[in-house]
Image (tube, helix red, strand yellow):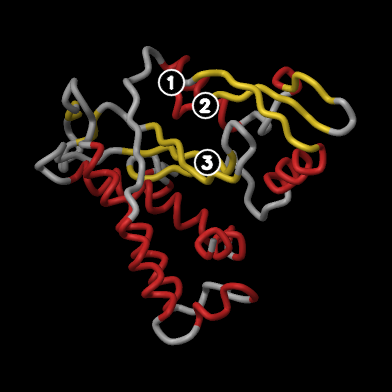
Amino acid sequence: MPKITVLYQNQRLMYSILLKSAGDTITELAKDPKFLGAQTGVTAVLHTWGQNLSFHPHVYCIVPGGGLSNDGLRFIRSSKKFFLPVRVISRKFRGKFFYYLKETFKNGDIKLFNDTAELGHGFNFLNFIDSLYQTDWVVYCKKPFKSPWHVVNYLGRYTHRVAISNSRIVDFDRTTVTFRWKDYRDNNKVKLMTLKAEEFVRRFLLLYTCPVCGGIMVFSGLIGNAYAGP
């Protein structure tokens, strides 16, 4: 698929745009008086794989339950029901990503070659990006953590672990590898997947030979560098 190939050819750049889009989406929506009207912060963690070792770039974000007022003198708490509307986040996130992607292309920073070389001619790339607006982006919001310990524990799971641990590998018969994986689309059911050994190694190495592997963490908004003290 062209969109996956474009991503593979520009991984470092794409992941940077993905993280920036996520952080900007949340901080900008939080500033809007319709939603929160406050300055919030974001801790964003990049992951590039799914439970079945498939290529699946996505971002985990941890945000405070509110933010500082514009004068910086009081903390404004978010609604108990939700922090920001999920559908609004999804659409703005998609729009942010494609906007930054188009600007990056106009600056000549997107590399297109081999199967994607044709996209570099005329308006082909911009038209290609416009066609992707038809796809809805998935945003999932979880309930707040119970304590700071839970926050650190959650972050640790995504910043200090490999794509698959030995405990998930069920069988290896020198030809195939069978491992457990959780299917989030099927009520988080734990299933078994069997791959040829070569395919298992291919997926595993693909996740660890990319320019920027999963586990990259960035901070924006109130907890970004611009707010850091001396």
Rendered position, 132 above or below 40: below
Q: Position of residue 99 (x, y in %)?
A: 34, 65
Point 37% across, 18% down: residue: 145
Q: Quadrant of residue 78?
A: top left
Q: CA distance from mark 2 to mark 3?
A: 25 Å
Q: Is residue 229 or residue 139 the one in the foreground?
A: 139
> Which kind of residue does numbered mark 1 sit on?
Asn
Question: Badge 3 local density, few (<14 within 10 Å), some, or many (20+)?
Answer: some
Say whether disc 2 or disc 3 marks the residue closer to the N-terminus: 2
The amino acid type, in three-letter code, at marker 2 is Asp
- Evaluate if marks 1 and 3 touch, with contact meaning CB atoms under 8 Å apart: no
Measured along the vertical axis of the image, is residue 22 above or below residue 8? above
Q: Disc 3 designates what residue?
A: 217
Front position in the image: 148 or 118? 118
Q: Earlier in the sequence, mark 1 or mark 3?
A: 1
Quarter of the image with the N terminus is bottom right
Q: Nearer the viewer, mark 1 or mark 3?
A: 1
How far apart marks 1 and 3 lie (CA) works out to 28 Å
Label 3 sits on a secondary structure element that is: strand
* Disc assigned to residue 187: 1
The residue where tag 2 is placed is 183
Q: Mark 1 near mark 2, Cβ–Cβ under 8 Å?
A: yes
- Structural crowding at the residue carrying mark 2, measured as other residues with C-alpha within 10 Å and reported as few (<14), some (14–19) or many (≥20): some
Residue 79 at x, y = what percent?
16, 25
Question: Which label lies toward us, 2 or 3?
Answer: 2
Q: Amino acid at mark 3?
A: Met
Q: Seen in the image, is 178 located left or right of residue 117?
A: right
Q: Position of residue 180 (x, y in %)?
A: 65, 22
Judging from the image, what secondary structure is the residue with disc 1 in?
loop
